[in-house]
Amino acid sequence: MILRFLFLLSLLWVFPAQVFAQASPNVSVLDTVYQDLDALVALGLIKDRVVGQRPYSEREIVWMAKQAEKNLLLNLSQAQQDFSVEKRLKRSQRLINKIKRRFSTLWNESPQDLTKVEIKPISQLSLGFLKLDASPRGFGDNGLGLLEASLNPLIAYREGRHLVNGSNLAMELQHGFRLSPYFYLQAQERMQLALAEDGSQENKVFIHQLSGKFLIKNLEVQVGRDAILWGQGEDGGLLLSANARPLDAIQLSNDLPFRLPWVFKVLGPAKFSFFFADLGPEQHFPHSKLVGTKLSFQPYSFFEFGLSNMTLFGGEGAPSAGLGTRLTDIFPLVQFLTGAQAQVDNKMGGFDFRFHFKRLRGSELYLEAIFDDTPGKDQKKFWIEDAGHVLGVWLPRLTDDGRLSLRLEYRRTGIRYYRHPQFQSGWSLNQNILGDDLGPDAQGFYFKVYYELRPEHRLALHGAWESRSEDRYIGGVSDGGLSFSKVEDRVEETRLRLGAYWNFEPEEIPLRLKLEGAYERVQNFAFVSGETQHHWLAALSLDVFFKSFYTSP
């Protein structure tokens, strides 16, 4: 297995995408540039893109935008004969120019003229005010395991930023330093003034992101704190999403999609990722470790699939295990073939795929299935009780030019999802679920409508209906393995949520302004019959982008 791992790393070196190597920072998935890339894909201008592993580096974003520009030039001749095509191409050119201005240093470089040194004392300044009136709650013991996390959906998927029930004022600064063409250092700190409704204050300074990235040809080694997202959804997936703070990890991956040699080239553009993370001192077993591997392939321009596996283990006071047991758990194929299984960790893994329908205006259908156990004889337990699913539909061009788009999703999780009897922090980091904020034993329907009022103005309307259960169970052992029996049927908690936001990004000024608001109605809050609560949020934020202070060719 170790030899296979080293062989795959060698492929990342020998068969990279044909583009010059230049280390660059990752761009947060909360950035609107991902919406721009989605639009260019829907307009048929980006063919090679792996969605299941994000965030993208600046280099990968520029690489995709250059794909779009090349394909745009090939389509210009049609614009003279078809007005609808002309409208699409004009919007495409605006989106490409926006990316070109934002990442001008990388865009203008060539293999013969790489920037050796780049200094950005401030690459981005972010100011924000958020007013929140929403009660958080935790997750109780349903008899199958614990989960030490806080639920407050109005402020989910903000990369784990700590927000109090009250007034929150924050400033964030990003810094970037390229010390050679092959190394980039990025840092981001957050300064927060928070006044809660109960009168308490949380005035703190956080290191939100700090990492160094080495890039040799197409092999990327990153050390430090940065986000890792796996899944086809806008905010990530069931294993890793934008809900929790960035991980403190060592990560190996290929920066750009690469093609395998020989007969494996039929798998198309591929991305590989392996990481080893420390979950910090707040875990039930302090400094528990999280190890993950993901493979993503795009054998056809209309189809992508991925395989994921993650193991949570170790920490102070955790069950011990030998090297052989650890390797068996990290690489699930060995466990599947040998049947070996030890109760010394928490494992999750599964698959995801995405279909792209060019003839349906770039519409997409995607599915993710992640399992909280290895297969056994009880198929219902494996596919339903121990599983989580995401089914999504992305309609990026309700209008021909793509100014109006719609995303629909259904999500569900099993009765012990994210919980664990030994690792009692569950699938969480600093009180935030690492994966889907929906949590265990729940289901939800979601929609999001985007409308580009003008090139500088984007509106979005989003809503959700969620149902969560905390019925109590007892576990036992049968011929098929573990089995669960319900012993208490509790009332379900339901949430109805509606929100909207407006983004303003002027073409010639490097800033972004965002105004948002949301409302949530909760019935049977915390599974108390008749307990109804009304929550709301209002926020205003400003991002300003700065060019390099110094560059050296």
Image (cartoon, rainbow, N blue to C red):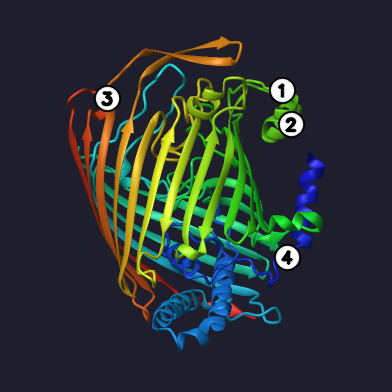
Q: Could you tell me which secondary element the residue under label 3 belongs to?
A: helix
The nearer-to-camera label among 1 and 4 is: 1
**N-term mark: 4 or 3:** 4
Question: x and y percent of residue 127 in the render?
Answer: 32, 62
* Residue count near mark 2 (Cα–Cα under 10 Å), binned few <14, some 14–19, many ≥20: some
Front one among 324 and 485: 485
Question: x and y percent of residue 204 in the render?
Answer: 36, 48
**Residue 538 visible, this orientation:** yes
Disc 3 and disc 1: Cα gap in Å?
39 Å
Q: Is residue 546 above or below residue 431?
A: below
Disc 1 and disc 4: Cα gap in Å?
38 Å
Q: Which numbered tag is attached to residue 217?
A: 4
Front one among 113 and 180: 113
Q: Which numbered tag is attached to residue 527?
A: 3
Q: Which residue is mark 1?
A: 340
The nearer-to-camera label among 4 and 3 is: 3
Disc 2 and disc 1: Cα gap in Å?
8 Å
Q: Which residue is mark 2?
A: 334
Say which amino acid is labelled 2: Val
Question: x and y percent of residue 267 in the render?
Answer: 70, 55
* Residue count near mark 3 (Cα–Cα under 10 Å), binned few <14, some 14–19, many ≥20: some
Q: Which numbered tag is attached to residue 278?
A: none
Contact between marks 3 and 1 (CB within 8 A): the answer is no
**Residue 163 visible, this orientation:** no
* Residue count near mark 4 (Cα–Cα under 10 Å), binned few <14, some 14–19, many ≥20: many
Q: Residue at x 74, y 31 (%)?
A: 334
Say which amino acid is labelled 4: Lys
Q: Could you tell me which secondary element the residue under label 4 belongs to?
A: loop
**N-term mark: 2 or 3:** 2
Q: Could you tell me which secondary element the residue under label 1 belongs to?
A: loop
User: Horizontally, is 535 left or right of 343 in the view?
Assistant: left
